[in-house]
Image (spheres, rainbow, N blue to C red):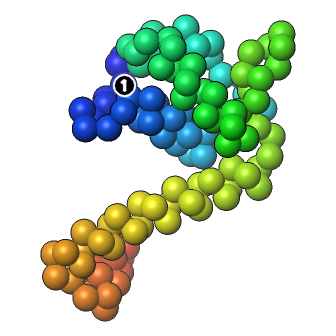
Amino acid sequence: MAWDFESDRPIYTQLLEKIQQMIISGKYQPGDRLPSVRDLSTEAEVNPNTMQRALQELERQGLVYSQRTSGRMITDDIVLIKAMKQKVAIEYMKKFLGTMKELGFSKAEIIELLSDMNSE
C-alpha cells in the first residue's frame, strides 16, 4: 500500500519523517533490520534514489546504521531514540499550540480542553 504524501513538501523529507516515526513509535525496534531500499521504495511507491536519500539522512542522524553484509539496522541507542521522540513531540506540540492560539484560545482554555478530553 502506497504511503500518503503531501504535495507541498519534498517527498524525501516526508519519507524521512515517516521512517523516523516508525522508529520512535516502536514499529521498528532497536537492532531491527530495515527492509532494503528497493523494498521500501516499492512499498512507498517512490523512486529508489529518493528512498536512498532519506535513509542516508537517517544514518546521519544516527537512527540507522549500515552493516556491510546485513543492510541497514535500527540503532540500539535507546537514549537517542527517546531524545528523537521527545524532539518530534515538542514539534507537534508547538504546531498544536500555535494553531490553538490562532483560534483565539488562551493557555488556560487549552489546558482545560486537554483536561476535559483526557477525562473522557
Q: Residue furthest right?
A: 68
Q: In terms of depth relative to the viewer, which is nearer, 35 or 61?
A: 61
Residue 99 percent coordinates (x, y): 25, 69
**Image quadrant where one finds the N terminus:** top left
Quarter of the figure with residue 38: top right
- Label 1 sits on a secondary structure element that is loop
**Crowd around label 1: few <14 · some 14–19 · many ≥20 (10 Å):** few
Q: Residue furthest left?
A: 103
Residue in the picture at 49% in, 65% down: 90
Residue in the picture at 16% in, 75% down: 103
**Image quadrant where one finds the C terminus:** bottom left
Query: What amino acid type should be assigned to the residue bearing mark 1?
Result: Trp
Residue 54 percent coordinates (x, y): 54, 28
Q: Which residue is mark 1?
A: 3
Judge whether 120 appears above or below 10 on screen.
Answer: below
Q: Is residue 1 visible?
A: yes
Quarter of the figure with residue 28: top right
Residue 64 percent coordinates (x, y): 71, 33
Q: Is residue 29 visible?
A: no
Residue 69 percent coordinates (x, y): 83, 10
Tally of marks: 1
Q: In terms of depth relative to the viewer, which is nearer, 5 or 9?
A: 9
